[in-house]
Amino acid sequence: MKNRLMIALDVENAQLALDVSQNLSSHVGWFKVGLRLFVAEGPVLIKKLSEQNKIFLDLKFHDIPNTVAQAVQSAGGLGVQMLNVHAAGGPDMLKRAADAASMFPDMKLIAVTVLTSEALPEDLAEELVVTRALLSKECGLDGVVCSVQEAKAVKHACGHDFITVTPGIRWGEQDVQDQKRIADPTTAITSGADFLVVGRPILGAKNPLDAVNEALEMMHKAASIK
Ligand code: C5P
């Protein structure tokens, strides 16, 4: 299960990111670097983190096709194992992104469908997510970011091998914060999500390692009864 858990390193600087990754790397398979940390520390930190960890670079590229293709090429050169673009960029952008990513066979390219912080009625969210997932698949991408609530429908429409990465994970009495379409680790696994992204519930916990173990335990239990 540790290879299905991704910690969002939404911290201020490289030192904090390296501290978190060192403390958790034997328990967690992946670290996700998003806008905050990348804007602050850039490629140097990515290279350092990827010496010991698998990295999902979550920059959600969304621009004209040529610009996105060039950015994907640059990101691929950093040696990350997963990268994303925004499916709302449309088919030309997605195809050009997939072409650029094909030069890096060890890197999965996935598309953000609808942010988990958007509160759409469930049926609308599912329709839009599945439409964008099908488009992403047709354009040659490896999977999508979606909420747990849509993971089953995406697998049904796009096939078992099409990757689903699900943020918006919360459990127990945790603060939902800005997330809207949330679910707990048990539901994520039983819904067929491939990867669970967790940030603040772990980074903000009194003991982050305890929070990681709690999530892993729920994931293991869910997988054993699935
Ligand atoms: O702290 P929290 O667990 O809410 O963090 C979720 C992480 O997943 C954040 O880094 C956020 O940028 C990212 N994310 C998301 N929804 C998406 C795509 C990425 O919450 N659709």
Image (cartoon, rainbow, N blue to C red):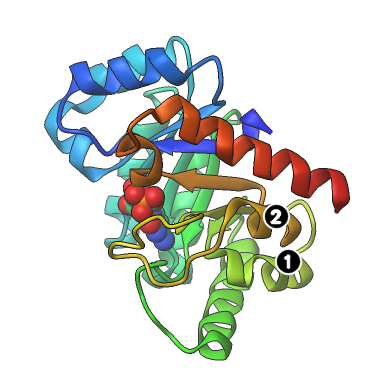
Up-down relation of residue 184 to residue 158 (above or below): above
Q: Is mark 1 within 8 Å of ligand 1?
A: no
Q: Residue 75, position in %: x, y?
A: 36, 33
Outermost residue, right side: 225
Q: Residue 125, position in %: x, y?
A: 51, 82
Up-down relation of residue 135 to residue 220 (above or below): below
Q: Residue 217, position in %: x, y?
A: 66, 37
Q: Residues within 10 Å of mark 1 (few under 14, many from 20)?
A: some
Q: Nearer the viewer, residue 62 or 180?
A: 180
Q: Residue 212, position in %: x, y?
A: 51, 32
Residue type (three-letter) at the residue carrying disc 2: Phe
Q: Which mark is residue 158?
A: 1
Q: Residues within 10 Å of mark 2 (few under 14, many from 20)?
A: many
Question: Where's the N terminus, which quadrant?
Answer: top right
Q: Which mark is residue 67?
A: none
Residue type (three-letter) at the residue carrying disc 1: Cys
Residue 226 seen anywhere in this rendered image of the structure: yes
Image point (30%, 60%), residue name = 62
Q: Nearer the viewer, residue 129 or 151?
A: 151
Q: What secondary structure is marked by label 2? A: loop
Task: Kindly report the distance in space between the C-alpha atoms of the residues bearing marks 1 and 2.
Answer: 6 Å
Corner quadrant of residue 41: top left
Image point (50%, 40%), residue name = 101
Q: Name the residue tied to disc 2.
A: 162
Image point (68%, 43%), residue name = 219
Asked whether disc 1 touches disc 2, contact meaning CB atoms under 8 Å apart, the reply is yes
Image point (33%, 45%), residue name = 200
